[in-house]
């Protein structure tokens, strides 16, 4: 795992911690979002598998250490720090919600408790992978809500912010409820069903649309899906019917999808293909799909690319990774920020879910009649929990989201939002830390 895939200040702080003799201090950091993006009533947690893989394989190679030593920021750093990096391994603990769990603002998605340097260095990577995948998984859940149970396929790699982002976007979209992806690597790596049709270039490369369809059918048989709007959509549908069995269905990629899907459905049914499917693509999002469903468009499958793989209407959510407590020489000190709009709560936490609210509490508290959402995943640098597969996380997301009130599954902001209450002990701890900070500031 490339240890330099991080921000420079993580490593300069690490050097500073080492030179200050703070490497043995045990720090607890929490990763959470301060506020949900617009029109999101919850966030689907995703990215834990990649976070754990990163932490358990984090190493500094000699080439990376040599590069750091060449930087002016490390000119005054003692050689012992670089020896420390050569031996660096993650030996700490990770606590997290299961992937696919709906969470709310202020609730930890992931908690890291480790020697200070080991907890600090991963911040950038953890925020990137958990933040991005949670955004895409949430977007996918919204698409599934809009589709009313009709399948949605992720088609976004070509518009993702990098090929690598396309792979994990496909994984996150599957966790959020999508039926599969067009990304073949994601299919192999994560066991996600893969889907594909053909491009307009396929049709255009043959002398006639009929020949293009016949060649595709010869290649794919019952899996063939004809892209029928290269020239004239209804003529394309008629040619598909004329060729006959077998084929899976047709794809519409342009035009008035309500009117065209109805007309194409009529052509397919009257031609003896009532089981042939209609897939729709073309700059779709949850609002467009909601309109199509409301209009009764006979569309069976939706393919969504750009809007899903980039979560384009909410491409960020301000995830943060904040120090909440630190222990040194047998003493524990709780930490918090109290700056306006960027305040945090001190101490490691647990999230208790009740039927009608969540309770955010200190990690050692109990709450009868609730489900504790944060569980141990890594202890002393060793994996202790069985991580969900993408399919397992998808099923957990499906069941968990279905259990939420209908108003929270809306594509628009719920009023009032889901209640997240603070335990009395957590409120008291926060007040004590605030008072201590005021005394220090005097």
Image (tube, grey):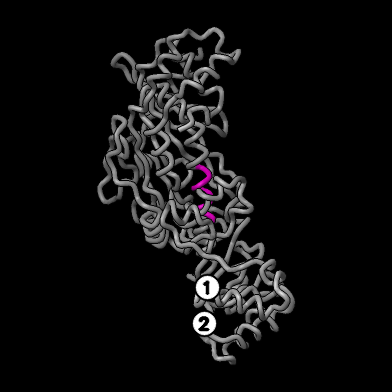
Q: Which mark is residue 246?
A: 2
The image quarter containing residue 277 is: bottom right
The residue to which callout 1 is attached is 220
- How many tags in the picture? 2
How far apart in space, not on screen, are marks 1 and 2 (Cα)? 9 Å
In x, y percent, where is residue 204?
Answer: 72, 70
First to last magenta residue range: 131-139
- What SS does tag 2 mark? loop
* Image position of 79 with respect to 128: above or below: above
| Front residue of 406 and 177 | 177
Specify few, some or many for label 2: CA neighbours under 10 Å numbering under 14, 14-19, or 20 or more.
some
Q: Is residue 297 left or right of residue 437?
A: right
Q: Which mark is residue 433?
A: none
In x, y percent, where is residue 211?
Answer: 66, 79
* Residue 252 visible: yes
* Residue 41 visible: no
């Amino acid at each position: 795992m490339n240890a330099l895939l991080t921000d420079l200040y993580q490593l300069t702080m690490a050097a500073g911690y080492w030179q200050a003799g703070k490497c043995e201090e045990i720090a607890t950091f929490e990763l959470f979002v301060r506020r949900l993006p617009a029109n999101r009533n919850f966030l689907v947690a995703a990215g834990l598998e990649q976070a754990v893989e990163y932490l358990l394989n984090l190493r500094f190679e000699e080439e990376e250490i040599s590069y750091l030593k060449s930087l002016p920021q490390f000119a005054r750093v003692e050689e012992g720090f670089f020896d420390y990096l050569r031996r660096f391994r993650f030996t700490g603990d990770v606590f997290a919600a299961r992937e696919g769990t709906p969470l709310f603002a202020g609730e930890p998605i992931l908690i890291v408790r480790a020697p200070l340097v080991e907890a600090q260095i991963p911040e950038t990577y953890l925020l990137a992978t958990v933040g991005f995948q949670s955004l895409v998984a949430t977007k996918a859940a919204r698409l599934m809500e809009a589709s009313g149970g009709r399948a949605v396929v992720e088609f976004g790699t070509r518009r993702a912010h990098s090929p690598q982002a396309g792979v994990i976007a496909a994984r996150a979209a599957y966790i959020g409820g999508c039926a599969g992806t067009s990304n073949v690597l994601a299919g192999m790596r994560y066991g996600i069903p893969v889907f594909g049709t053909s491009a307009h270039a396929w049709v255009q490369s043959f002398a006639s649309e009929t020949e293009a369809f016949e060649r595709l059918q010869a290649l794919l048989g019952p899996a063939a899906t004809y892209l029928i709007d290269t020239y004239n959509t209804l003529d394309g549908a008629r040619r598909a019917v004329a060729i006959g069995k077998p084929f899976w269905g047709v794809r519409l990629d342009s035009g008035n999808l309500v009117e065209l899907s109805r007309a194409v459905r009529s052509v397919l049914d009257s031609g003896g293909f009532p089981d042939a499917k209609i897939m729709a693509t073309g700059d779709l999002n949850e609002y467009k799909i909601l309109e199509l469903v409301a209009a009764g468009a006979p569309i069976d499958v939706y393919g969504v690319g750009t809007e899903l793989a980039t979560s384009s209407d909410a491409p960020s959510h301000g995830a943060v990774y904040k120090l909440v407590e630190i222990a040194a020489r047998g003493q524990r000190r709780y930490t918090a920020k109290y700056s306006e709009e960027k305040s945090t709560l001190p101490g490691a936490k647990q999230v208790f879910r009740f039927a009608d609210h969540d309770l955010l509490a200190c990690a050692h508290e109990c709450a009868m009649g609730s489900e504790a959402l944060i569980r141990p995943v890594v202890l002393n640098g060793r994996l202790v929990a069985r991580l969900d597969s993408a399919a397992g996380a998808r099923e957990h997301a499906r069941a968990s989201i279905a259990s939420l009130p209908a108003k929270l599954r809306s594509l628009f902001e719920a009023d009032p939002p889901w209640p997240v209450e603070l335990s009395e002990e957590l409120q008291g701890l926060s007040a004590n830390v605030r008072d201590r900070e005021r005394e220090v500031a005097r």
